[in-house]
Image: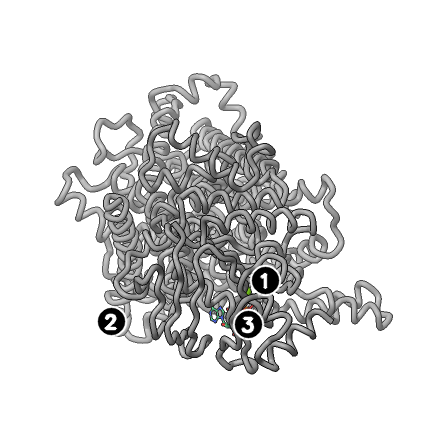
Amino acid sequence: MASEVKFEKVDFYYGAFKAIDSLQLTILARKVSAFIGPSGCGKSTVLRMVNRTNELVAERTRLEGRVLIADENIYDGVDLFSLRKKVGMVFQRPNPFPKTVYENIAWAPRIHGVKRTDELDEIVEKSLKRAALWDQVKNKLKSSALSLSGGQQQRLCIARSIAVNPEVLLMDEPTSALDPRATARIEDLVEELKADYTIVIVTHSMQQAARISDSTAFFLSEGAGRPGRLIEFGETERVFTNPSSRLTEKYITGRFG
Amino acid sequence: MAVVGIILIFTFVISAGLPLFFKVGPYRFLFGMEWRPTGGQFGILPLILGTLLVVAGALVVGGSAGVVTAIFLSELCPQVLKRTFKVVVELLAGIPSVVYGFFGIIVLIPFIRSQVGGSGYGILSASIILGIMILPTVTAIAEDAVSSVPIDYKLAGLSLGATDWQTIRQVILPAATGGIATALVLGIGRAIGETMAVLMVIGNAPQIPDSLVKPVSALTSTIALDMAYASGDHRTALFAIAIVLLLIITLLLISIRLLHARLGSAE
Amino acid sequence: MTRARVFDLSAKAVAWAVAISTMVFLILIIGYVVIRGVPSIASVGLEFFTTAPRGIKMQGGVYPMIVSSIYLTVLSLVIAFPIGLGAAIYLAEYAGRGRFVELIRFSADLLSGVPSIVFGLFGLAFFVYFLKMGYSVLAGALTVFLMVLPTLVRTSEQAIKAVPRSYREASLALGASKWQTIRRVVLPSAAPGILTGVILAMGRAFGETAAVLFTAGSVPQTPASPLDGGRTLTVHLFYLATQGQIEDSFRVAAVLLFVVLGFNLTAGWMMARFRRRFG
Ligand SMILES: Nc1ncnc2c1ncn2[C@@H]1O[C@H](COP(=O)(O)OP(=O)(O)OP(=O)(O)O)[C@@H](O)[C@H]1O
Ligand SMILES: [Mg+2]
């Protein structure tokens, strides 16, 4: 079950610093949306709003406005644990737990109440298959996840998120630490997964955004200390070929050129 | 210089204490039930037992509180408090052991005497004082270990909908086990070697105890207490006890090294 | 599900409770000694620091003990500083990763783990009897020197290693020799870090009891030369406390706490500044 994510007039603060200014954005279900923009414009911040992990990386954060997942405001009395279970996250650096491959996947289902071994086995197999990793690790389920290659580790992290049936999948530069081949496999995987999930991916690669996303959001901050703003959001093809803002055009041509 | 120092210490202490091993026999020395040096009885089992009991007690008191405090400091404590707490812990590590011993005499002993019974001097008091003394060591090293676990693990755990405690207990702590074990072993080392504070509250009776409030003797406190008047075989015996202490801390140090080597190769 | 959450909250509550009570308890120890000790010192007045103890119970002033403690601390550091610094320079700048260096590090770790009473025994056997120094400040200082050496070497080595490579490279590029670079560039930059180690070591030396009891002795006299024996404040406190002279003990304990915590606070503050500079 994939859900729509909606930002309504959102301002976001780290302490006294306003990082995001009046964000208005709707992310469609079963689509891949890409966030692009120069470093420090707030892409990760917006991404982390969706599973409320900004408040884990900084001590004093504040959000004004509403963020809705399937029409429910997640900043108004929502249960944090079920929210985070509902929204999976994949990080820039692959971060499998220092446990076995099997335990990496089984850990979250288990803490959410799945006890039976056969059920867990099934979830592990299904998630690994979904992440196109099963064939490579089915004989290594009991070895340490840290022994896998970087690309495999990242797909393991994707499988780990999938294992709890999220509705939204957030990916913060998931391929920036990987080589081109591993990157290509992740991109294929993203294409496949979008049938079931709402996917948001932050990327610094215009080519990647153009290749895999359906919609693209361009963020920009006018300089250090200024808040990031959404400059343009639309169908990827249109944003790249016929941007409505000069700023978008400048950024894209600069990055392609 | 450190090498020279350590060699000097080992050779001098060993050469001064070894004759007793031969005279009494290592078995009767280590496992003899009676320590009555003026009567020619040199069994240090009661002393070993005394040390083991108070160190175990210290580990229960200070080891557990130290690890919990370390987890608190690195995972739960708000930044504002963290600095203050860390300074306090550092300061405690610097308080001289006679001052701890004095504190034990004026506060702990009367308290135990009135609340638990006995004279107040004994295993319980020594365990608590030692526990307090090893707490800063354990806390500081365990805190290092816990906070050096990458924040990525924590974020991953919490983003999967786990609670803080589940993430700490099942992801962060397992990743920090080696460091926490090191902290505890160093705490044990400190507790075994601590002399003055123990001497002041343990009661100094070389007996096999039948309750926690019974006075006992430890290896270190016996040396400190007897050295003032010991002569002849008695003196040699004290050096022999020192050999036992040196052996124990060497073994502890080697175990830490092995622990690190194993963890190092696992990664 | 709710069970996990209840568990989470209770575990966190327990952690808070343990941490807070630990802190409170620790502050209480310091606070109690200070609150009882300081007014007591004030009631005796300045004489407490300037006169010798009176009578068989050793009440009153602690002048000889203060002199002994300072004498012993300074002397041990005067011996330890050049040797410790030399060893640190060697380890940080010259030593590779060979077996010998491993041996040095293992010895240093071992040395820092040796119980202080064993240092005391060794000092008694070696310095007092074998080298015929007798119970003396010198024998005490030499024993304490061995005790503080590992700390001193480790902190100095870390301070030297913390000096950025670029500093060294800049100097070497200007044609300075390695030793000149170390002396003119590295050591001055590392000085605050090294000083931190020295202050920490002084705190330890000042607070040590077991190792000085059987080397410097316990005679309550004012040592006039390093070969005289003396009674440090710590040894004095030990006797007072075990003889049940609570009021006198509080005064001495307060002085000890102030000096040792003063050393440690200064060291901590300097270390923080040093770290800020070299990240
Ligand atoms: N934990 C934090 N505490 C305080 N400020 C933060 C924190 N994280 C980010 N910021 C600030 O918020 C702004 C947006 O940062 P963010 O990391 O969201 O940008 P980004 O677009 O993801 O950049 P990058 O492309 O480099 O990842 C920046 O000015 C940054 O300094
Ligand atoms: Mg980012």
Q: The residue tagged with tag 3: helix, strand or loop?
A: strand
* Residue C204 placement, left or right of B265: left
Check contact, mark 2 vs mark 1: CB within 8 A. no
Q: Which residue is mark 2?
A: C39
Q: The residue tagged with tag 2: helix, strand or loop?
A: helix
Check contact, mark 1 vs mark 3: CB within 8 A. no
| Residue at mark 2 shares a chain with residue at mark 3 | no
Would residue C57 be seen by someone viewing this image from the given angle? Answer: no
**Mark 2 neighbour class, 10 Å CA radius: few under 14, some 14 to 19, many 20 or more:** few
Query: Compared to C272, does A115 lie above or below?
Result: above
Amino acid carrying mark 2 in the image: Pro
Residue at figure coordinates x 52%, y 77% from the top left: A231
Amino acid carrying mark 3 in the image: Phe
Amino acid carrying mark 1 in the image: Thr
Nearer to the camera, A224 or A170: A170
Host chain of mark 2: C
User: Mark 2 or 1, which is nearer the eye?
Assistant: 1
Quadrant including the C terminus of chain C: bottom right
Residue B17: give x, y in percent of width and height: 52, 29
Q: Which residue is mark 1?
A: A203
Host chain of mark 3: A
Residue A76: give x, y in percent of width and height: 27, 65
Q: CA distance from mark 2 to mark 1?
A: 67 Å
